[in-house]
Amino acid sequence: MNFHLTTKDENSGVSASPRPRVPASIFRLESTMTQKDSLPKIIILDTTMRDGELTPGVKMTLQDKLKLAKHLEAMQVDVIEVGCPGIFPKDFDEIIAVSGMVRESIICGLAGSKQDEISCLAQALKPAARSRIHLYTPVNHQDQSEMDEQELLEVIGDSVSLARNYCADIEWSAFDAPRSKPDFLCKAVEVAIKSGVTTISIPDTFGSLVPEQFSGLIEMVSNRVPNIEQATISVHCHNDLGLAVDNSLAALACGARQIECSINGLGARKGNADLVEVVTAIANHQDYRVDVEPTLLPQASELVAEITDTQLIPNPG
């Protein structure tokens, strides 16, 4: 039996569109991880509070995020992405509060390339024991001239350099990478790393690729960017085709070492890769390891369903 999520319509009480399915096995999951310390570690970035809040009908309060952050830290999630304060003002206070409470996990926020967005995020992250600034820049500019491309590369370099003034841990995302020109994408990644980025995220922004295509994209970046070994490759896959988890896992064989995902697969449009499915798959994989505590996964799923006013409803099959 499988499960899927629905969001309650506040006015009618009728359930809205189904959310990504959650395997019933998560509710029976026991700690079956073996010691695999010698294997490559896969970093888990949870974006339930940031991208998950883009799910239609889902809103989280400050207390919701504090409760969830406490559970994510107990689970030993590596990176907790809380919000995007330059776009959503309420996220500013939420990042401050979570930063002041969490001591072990890295607290992360998202910002575009504008100076005010970056400085706003940096201010919110000040209380964090461990912080990360996550930047993004659209790279799909098929009709750009060489001059336009050079200007965009300068924007990327300048934004990363500014963020480095506030924080040593910088992630940069190539927004809409699948539809960008390969040469420009690789050059943009190279510039970002030269400017001080420590994690490069290649997203399947609109969930348009199948595993063979997405792994090919990651492989191209791995092979063509000369300084790629100076940064961790991350992936952020959307679930529009129902392949977010498959795409994320396929990227590992091509060098990805961080997966961005969310509890119950919450996120924009049809959601993101489901954290429970990702962690379970890696925990049972012979070539990789993950530090997330598996016995706390069922509670995480139930907690998120509760605070986002969603329900786990059994599907036949």
Image: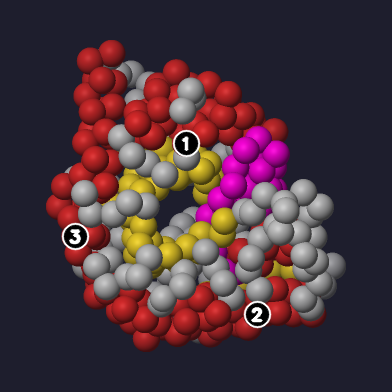
Kind of residue sitting beneath label 2: Leu
What residue is pinned by disc 1? 230
Please identify, in this view, whether the residue under mark 1 or under mark 2 is nearer the observer: 1
What residue is pinned by disc 3? 120
Relative side of 42 to 188, left or right: right
In magenta, the rendered stretch is 243-264
Disc 3 to disc 1: CB gap under 8 Å: no
Disc 2 element: helix
Is residue 173 visible in the rendered image? The answer is yes
Relative side of 111 to 224, left or right: left
Kind of residue sitting beneath label 3: Cys
Q: In which quarter of the image is the N terminus?
A: bottom right
Pick whichever, 152 or 241, lies toward us: 152
Relative side of 191 to 293, left or right: left
Q: In which quarter of the image is the C terminus?
A: bottom right
The numbered dot on residue 93 is none
Q: What residue is at 41 percent from the left and 38 percent from the top?
A: 174
Is 247 contained in the magenta span?
Answer: yes
Disc 1 to disc 2: CB gap under 8 Å: no
Q: How far apart are marks 3 and 1 (CA)?
A: 27 Å
Disc 3 element: helix
Residue density around tag 2, few if under 14, some if 14–19, many if 20 or more, within 10 Å? many
Residue 135 image position (x, y, % from top left): 33, 47
